[in-house]
C-alpha cells in the first residue's frame, strides 16, 4: 500500500520547468526560479507519501525523538485532509528544499488531495522560492529565522502567531546591562582642581624652557 503511494507520487512529480535547486543564503540548499514565474503559477508540486493521521503522528513523534537526540530534524509532513497527511521527506520531492520566509513569494495550495507550491507574485528569474512554514509557537525559540527580509520576525512562525510571538520576544529579551545605562546618565564627577588658564601660560617649577608640561604634571 505504501510503496504504491510512492510510485504514484513519483509519477506525478513535476519536471523542473520553473525551478532549480541551488545553495541558499537562508539555509543550506534552496529552490530558485529557473525563469521568470508569473503570479499564481503552480510552480512545483509537493509530492510524497499519503499516510493516515495515526501514521503521521507516529512519524512526528519519531522526528521529535530524533531532534532531541541529534538537535536537528526537519519536518516534511503536510496536513492533507481530515483523514490523511502527506510525508514529503523523500529525496525525489525537491519541493521539500524550499526554505521559509517572513515575506514569502509562494504559498502551499491544496487542491483535490494534492499540494502545489504556487507563486504569490511575479517572481524574477534567479530569486529564491520561499513560503511561510506556518509553524505554531511550540518551541518557538528553537526555530530562529534567517530569511533576511525587511519584516523578518526573527523566528519561523505563521503570520497569525506574530502578535503573540512579538510579546514573547519582548518578555524574553535580556534587559540592558547597567554599564549601558551609566553611559546614558553619567554619574556626577568630583570638582576638578583649578588649572592654569590657557590665556595665562605658566612655566612649571623645575622645568627648562621648552620642557614638556605634561611631564611635570605627572610627577
Ligand atoms: C524543509 S528544510 C528546507 C531545506 C533546507 N534548506 C535543506 O537544505 O535541507 C527545513 C529546514 O531548513 C531550515 N530553514 C528553512 N528556512 C529557514 C529560515 N528562514 N531560517 C533559518 N533556517 C531555515 C531549518 O533548519 C528547517 O528546519
Ligand atoms: Zn524571517
Image (cartoon, rainbow, N blue to C red):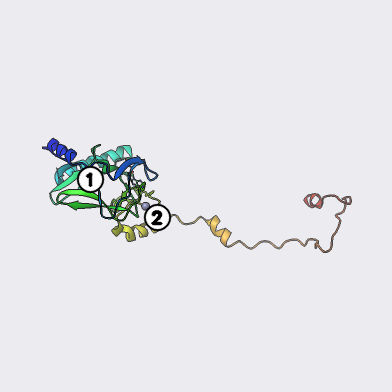
Q: Where is residue 154 in the image (x, y as percent from the top left)?
A: 38, 53
78 in relation to 170, above or below: above
Q: Would you identify the image quadrant in which residue 167 lies?
A: bottom left
**Comparing marks 1 and 2, which lies closer to the viewer?**
1
Tell me where residue 134 appears, x and y as whole percent.
28, 53
Numbered badge on residue 46: 1
Residue 143 location (% of width, % of height): 34, 48
Which of the two labelled residues, at mark 1 and mark 2, occupies the earlier sequence position? 1
**Looking at this view, is 142 or 122 the one in front?**
122
**What's the CA distance linking mark 1 and mark 2?**
36 Å
| Numbered circles on residues, count | 2
Residue located beneath label 2 in the image:
172
Callout 1 crowding tier (Cα within 10 Å): few <14, some 14–19, many ≥20: many
Q: Residue at 28% of width from left, 45% of height from top? A: 18
Query: What kind of element bears circle 1?
Result: strand
- Estimate how packed mark 2 is, as few (under 14), some (14 to 19) or many (20 or more) residues with alpha carbons within 10 Å: few
Judged from the image, the secondary structure of the residue bearing numbered disc 2 is: helix
Amino acid at each position: 500500500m505504501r510503496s504504491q503511494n510512492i510510485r504514484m507520487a513519483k509519477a506525478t512529480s513535476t519536471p523542473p520547468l520553473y525551478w532549480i535547486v541551488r545553495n541558499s543564503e537562508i539555509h543550506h540548499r534552496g529552490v530558485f526560479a529557473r525563469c521568470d514565474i508569473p503570479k499564481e503559477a503552480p510552480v512545483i508540486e509537493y509530492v510524497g507519501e499519503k499516510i493516515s493521521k495515526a501514521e503521521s503522528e507516529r512519524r512526528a513523534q519519531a522526528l521529535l525523538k530524533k531532534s532531541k537526540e541529534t538537535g536537528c530534524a526537519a519536518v516534511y509532513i503536510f496536513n492533507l485532509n481530515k483523514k490523511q497527511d502527506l510525508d514529503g521527506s523523500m529525496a525525489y520531492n525537491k519541493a521539500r528544499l524550499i526554505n521559509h520566509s517572513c515575506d514569502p513569494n509562494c504559498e502551499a495550495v491544496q487542491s483535490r488531495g494534492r499540494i502545489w507550491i504556487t507563486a504569490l507574485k511575479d517572481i524574477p528569474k534567479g530569486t529564491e522560492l520561499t513560503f511561510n512554514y506556518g509553524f505554531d509557537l511550540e518551541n518557538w525559540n528553537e526555530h530562529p529565522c534567517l530569511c533576511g527580509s525587511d519584516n523578518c520576525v526573527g523566528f519561523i512562525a505563521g503570520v497569525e502567531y506574530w502578535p503573540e510571538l512579538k510579546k514573547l520576544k519582548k518578555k524574553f529579551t535580556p534587559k540592558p546591562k547597567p554599564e549601558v545605562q551609566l553611559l546614558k546618565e553619567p554619574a556626577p564627577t568630583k570638582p576638578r582642581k583649578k588649572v592654569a588658564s590657557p590665556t595665562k601660560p605658566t612655566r612649571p617649577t623645575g622645568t627648562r624652557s621648552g620642557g614638556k608640561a605634561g611631564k611635570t604634571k605627572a610627577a
